[in-house]
Structures are given as structure tokens and as C-alpha cells.
Image: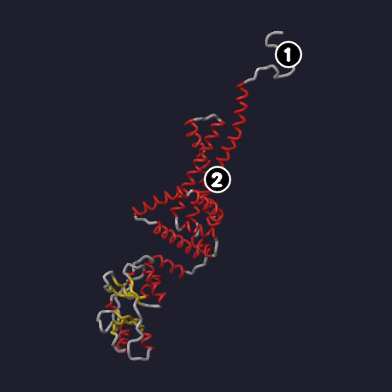
Amino acid sequence: MPVGALPFPCCPGVGQRADPGRGQAARDARGRGPVIWIALALGVAGLLLSGFFSGLETGFYRVTRIRLVLEALGGDRIAGMLLWLTNHPSLFIATCLVGNTLADYVTSLAAVLAAEILFGLRGHAAEIVVPLLLTPVVFVYGDLLPKNLFLHAPNRLLRKGGPLFALFVVLFFPVAAVLWAVDRMLAALVGETPERVRLTIARRELRLLLEEGHQVGLLQPAQRELAQGIFAVAKHPVSRYVVPLEQMPRVRTNAPKAAAQQLACQYGSPLVVVEDADQPGRLAGYTRAVELHLDRSDRVAPIRSLIEVSPDDHHLDVLMRLHSRGEDLAEVVDSSGRTLGLVTAESLRRPLFEGSAAGHPGETSKGEPARPQG
């Protein structure tokens, strides 16, 4: 028999030498199958995470804070968690930043693995070319589309994604806490605190909410003007509304009631300031003209106490303190204890309805200082 002849030609593979290249290719093909599926799963997961964090960031700025407050007061835990995050925006942004970075890394890794397995791209070529080709897909489905969805339905989508985001807050907290600390340090250096930014955002959201309410007919023009007046004077210092003592009727504690009533008529004021007879210049309080008329005694009574406020106190803060205590007059005292003047509840209420057109609180409607009449 010739050398190399096969004793059993009808039986393929018997007596033939094994092809090592074909076996290796088969093993490589079997090994690439699971890796391709892993790369595909990583790519889909990274794309979904990128869309999730990008959409949440947009929804965070579009969500109605007032609605979150009401739902949290009603016992909704998800709304309470979202409300807590709105009070700590630095932590929210840091978590989104870490999540987006991780999602982009996973997506790029999956794309490079798939390119290496399917097309044989390796090294820097795969790391540069593949992410560039994948950028339009990630931009559309991992950024543009989720942001558009959260822009139109922020409350609903934030509630659905709230529990999952809470899980990521816990998982990413070690890294997000570092970014949060860096943010606080930069805020301290720049002087722009998160609280100030949060108040600005809340004020803008409330203004937009009131404008929408006016457009759909829920608010009357007077209500809208009142809201605009509140926004206009909310941060004004009360020193802008101080009335000098010389422009207020004043009597001493030992003065007869008729003198106080006469001064109230001359000044056209419903309030009369009362000075201490034993310590001239020291204010003992004030009385109302109507209470002087109803009181049957001949003395200046009843004498109501003055609320002391600082000239740097805000307009609305002082007005709320006056209303909560049922008083009409407050004494403005500086840090050295010197009385700068008085501020009335009426002078604080007037700008709320007049807006920026309101004149100086110590002026009449014609712009002239209040003077005794007659």
C-alpha cells in the first residue's frame, strides 16, 4: 500500500491529520459569542443610564417645587426624597455627574469590545474611531430624547425614577460627597451660597407659576399685582420705609387724652406715639386713635408696645412680625441702640399693591412729607 494511503477511504476523518488552524478558529468563534452578548448588554445599559441621568437633571430644574411640598406633606415618601434633594442641589448634581460619567465609560467600553470582536480593530484605532462613530447615537438616545421627555413631563417621570435615583445616591455617595465638598469650598470662596441660588430658583418658579395661573384665569389681576409687589419688595431693607419721629404725632404718658386726640386729627394719623414722661426721648409705646375714643378715662390709654426691628431686616419679615403680633407700629433701632425712626404696617403694605411705583413711605400720595393739618 502506498505511503499515506487511507485504509478506509469511505470514512472521512479516519486516518486524516487534524487541522489545528480550523480548530482554533472554531474555539475562537465559540468564545466570541458570549463576549458579543456581554458587550451588547453593557452598551444598552450604558445608554439607558446616560439617558436616565441626563433626563433627571432636566426634570430637576423643571419640577414644580410647590407640588413636591404638598405631596410630601401628604405623606408621599418619593416626593419627600425629591424635596430633600431640591434642598441639597449640590448632592443631586454630583450624583448625576458621577452617573453620567460612569454611563459614558460603560458605553465606550462596550463599543470598543464589539469593534474588536466583529471587525478586529485594536489599540488606539478602536478607542478613537469607535466612540466618534457612536457619538450621534449616544447624543440622540442618551441625551436629547430623555431631556425632551423630562422637559414635558418632569413631575411624572421624576416620581417614576425617584426610587432608582435614590439607590444611585447611596451607591455614588462616597464619590459624590467629595464633589459636594469641593462645591461648598468654591461657594465659600466665591460668596455665592447654594441657599441664595435655591431661593432665586424658587422665586423664579413661583413667578412662572403665578403667570400661568393668570393666563388660564385662576388669578385675578389684583392677585397678580399683589404677587408682583411681593417679589418687588421682598428683599428691601426696612430702612427704606422708616418714618422720622418728627413726622409722627407724639405725646407723653402724663398728657391728657384730649391732647392726643387733637394731635391725631392734626396729623391725620390713626396712630399716636407715646413718650415716657420720666425719661424724655424714650418711647413708651403707641396708641390708636380709635382706642382713645373708645376709652372712657381721661388718660392716654391703652398704650401698646413697640416692636424693635433692625434697619437691615427685610420688608416682608417685619410685616409678618407686625401681623403675627397684631401691632401697627415698629421702632427701628440700630446696633448702638439709637432710634432711627418708626415703620408702620400701612407703609409696608402699600408697596405690595403699588409695586415699583410706590413712593417713599414717609410721603403722601402727592409726594410731599406728611405735615400737621391746620
Q: Where is residue 291 in the image (x, y as percent from the top left)?
A: 38, 86
Q: In this view, does 225 lie above or below 83?
A: below
| Residue situated furthest left in the rendering | 280
Q: Mark 1 points at which residue?
A: 7
Toward the viewer: 18 or 209?
18
Q: What element carries label 1?
A: loop
Upstream in sequence: badge 2 or badge 1: 1
Q: What element carries label 2?
A: helix
Residue plotted at (30% across, 88% down): 259
Residue plotted at (34% across, 77% down): 306
Q: Position of residue 145 (x, y in %)?
A: 53, 47
| Residue situated furthest top in the rendering | 2
Q: Name the residue under label 2.
A: 48
Describe residue 19's horizontal placement relative to residue 223 as left or right: right
Residue plotted at (45% across, 49% down): 176
Question: Residue 238 sits in which quadrant?
Answer: bottom left
Q: Where is residue 296 in the image (x, y as percent from the top left)?
A: 37, 91
Q: Is residue 365 above or below residue 35?
A: below
Q: How crowded is mark 2: few (under 14 residues within 10 Å), some or many (20 or more)?
A: some
Toward the viewer: 118 or 356?
118
Q: For marks 2 and 1, give the CA distance.
A: 62 Å
Q: Is residue 277 above or below residue 205?
A: below
> Mark 1 belongs to which amino acid?
Pro
- Total marks shown come to 2
Q: Residues within 10 Å of mark 1 (few under 14, many from 20)?
A: few
Toward the viewer: 150 or 184?
184
